[in-house]
Image: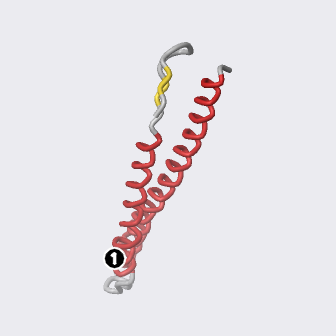
Amino acid sequence: MRTMAEGGGGEISLNPDELQRFAERAQSIGDLFQNRIRPEIERLSGLGYYAQGEAADAFAHYRQALEKMMDAGDFYYRAAQILALVAEIMSGQDEALAAAINEGR
């Protein structure tokens, strides 16, 4: 981590390791959805108990709700990708800034 407190508008602090930890946690949550929750949702969606009759409409909504729940897992995967990318970009920018400061530019 590099901190610059002189000049500019204040302190700039970068901790790409923290962003990476957030990315790893989001990835773990996405994995949980993929490996544990998705199979159960697929199993529940395949139940045919209420596929016909008066409960058919309610069961259709139930199936939609289960599918929406899986969207949450996809969002965690996407968040993990974005956080990892931001950490990589910020780290590169921090290194470039540190090199420029050390060279006296």
Which x, y percent locates residue 89?
Answer: 59, 42
In front here: 98 or 18? 98
According to the picture, the residue beneath numbered tag 1 turns out to be 40
The answer to which image quadrant residue 94 occupies is top right
In front here: 98 or 20? 98
The answer to which image quadrant residue 35 occupies is bottom left
The structure's colour scheme is: secondary structure
In front here: 74 or 12? 12
- 100 horizontally vs 35: left or right: right
Residue drawn at 43 percent across, 68 percent down: 67
User: Is disc 1 surrounded by few (<14), some (14 to 19) or many (20+) residues within 10 Å?
Assistant: some
- 88 horizontally vs 26: left or right: right
Residue drawn at 38 percent across, 54 percent down: 25
Label 1 sits on what residue type? Glu
Above or below 83: residue 96? above
Which x, y percent locates residue 15?
Answer: 45, 37
Above or below 22: residue 102? above
